[in-house]
Amino acid sequence: MQELTPYLNPAWGDGPDSLFSRVARAAVMATHRECDNRVCRMVSFVYGSGRPALWSHANLNEDTHDWLRGEFGKVPMSFFAQMAACVKAGDSSRCPRGQG
């Protein structure tokens, strides 16, 4: 995906700003059906395995679930390379610095 975009953005759930972001959002909306909040669904795609990736919906009230729409922004593709290096190292204290 790095060849297609310099970053991913969960905010594309509410406002895609390019052809790539519209295609990415359509793919996520077709495959991540954990709730009706499009940003929440994009977060699950961008940040992890699991659906949802970062929280249990049972622990979120409606106001908090709506609030999170404004809490996520651009994630540079270098972030994913750095996280892969950390996983490969097997120890977050040995995670390479300066990759993000």
Image: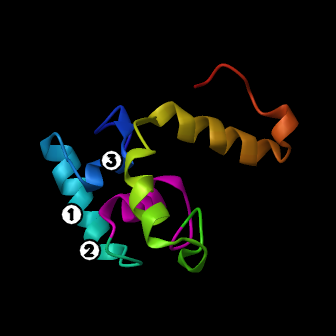
Cα separation between marks 2 and 1: 6 Å
Quarter of the figure that contains the C terminus: top right
Upstream in the sequence, badge 1 or badge 3? 3
Please name the residue that numbered disc 2 is placed on.
30
Secondary structure beneath disc 1? Answer: helix
Identified by mark 3, the residue type is Ala
Secondary structure beneath disc 2? Answer: helix
Please name the residue that numbered disc 3 is placed on.
11
Left or right position of 13 against 64: left
Upstream in the sequence, badge 3 or badge 2? 3
Secondary structure beneath disc 3? Answer: helix
In this orientation, which residue lies closer to the viewer: 52 or 66?
66
Residue extent of the magenta highlight: 37-52
Q: Nearer the viewer, mark 3 or mark 2?
A: 3
**How many C-alpha atoms fall within 10 Å of the one at disc 1: few (<14), some, or many (≥20)?**
few
Residue located 26% across and 65% down the image: 27
Q: Is 59 placed above or below 2 here?
A: below
**How many C-alpha atoms fall within 10 Å of the one at disc 2: few (<14), some, or many (≥20)?**
few
Residue located 36% across and 43% down the image: 9
Q: Is 89 placed above or below 76 here?
A: below
Image quarter for residue 31?
A: bottom left
Cα separation between marks 1 and 3: 13 Å
The reply to whether callout 2 and callout 1 are in contact (CB within 8 Å) is: yes
Residue 26's mark? Answer: 1
